[in-house]
Image (cartoon, rainbow, N blue to C red):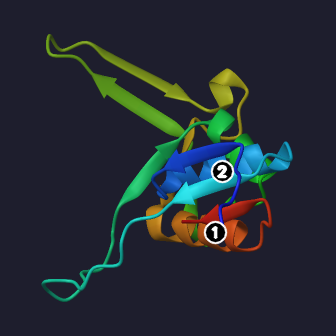
Amino acid sequence: MSKSFDVCIRGDGVVGRTLALLLARERLRVALVTRPNRLPAEPAKADVRAYALNSASRKLLETLRVWPDALFATPVREMQIWGDDGGQINFTAESVAQQALAWIVDVPALEQQLIQAVRYQPQIELV
């Protein structure tokens, strides 16, 4: 039996799952091509990766209801940047009338939110 999809996305990482959820909101049938299950060659290590996300990314993820809770998203309220020639700039979220300049987001927490959202979205099929 063949199936018909409007869109096929290769890759089920953060970007692929986010795109699939956005397209599903538009009532498109999405085939999300996942990684093949492989036996790990060595025991899995703890994933300590994090992303720095801007306000637009946060709004997008909130719209999709996949923004991680406060334990997994830490606001960046101040930045200091130094140049090679000794120049320096400091700025704060308050100085640009923002809640935060960015958020540091725990990758495994974000991935788990996206996995759950995709699982319960009938417009998306994992292939």
Q: Is residue 116 above or below residue 40?
A: above
Instruction: Name the residue that disc number 2 marks.
Output: 20
Q: Give the mark nearest the N terminus, 2 or 1.
A: 2
Q: Quadrant of residue 94?
A: top right
Q: Is residue 79 visible?
A: yes
Left or right of residue 44, residue 69 in this image? right
Q: Quadrant of the N terminus?
A: bottom right
Residue at screen point 68% across, 66% down: 118
| Image location of residue 10, percent across then percent down | 47, 49
Find residue 27 and report its horizontal and vertical position in percent.
86, 47
Across and down, in percent, residue 101 comes to 58, 35
Query: Looking at the rendering, which quadrant does residue 82 occupy?
Result: top left
Front: mark 2 or 1:
2
Above or below 67: residue 26? above
The amino acid type of the residue labelled 1 equals Gln
Residue 87: percent from left, percent from top: 25, 12
- At label 2, counting other C-alpha atoms closer than 10 Å, the crowd grade (few under 14, some 14-19, many 20 or more) is many
Q: In the drawing, what numbered circle is on residue 33? A: none
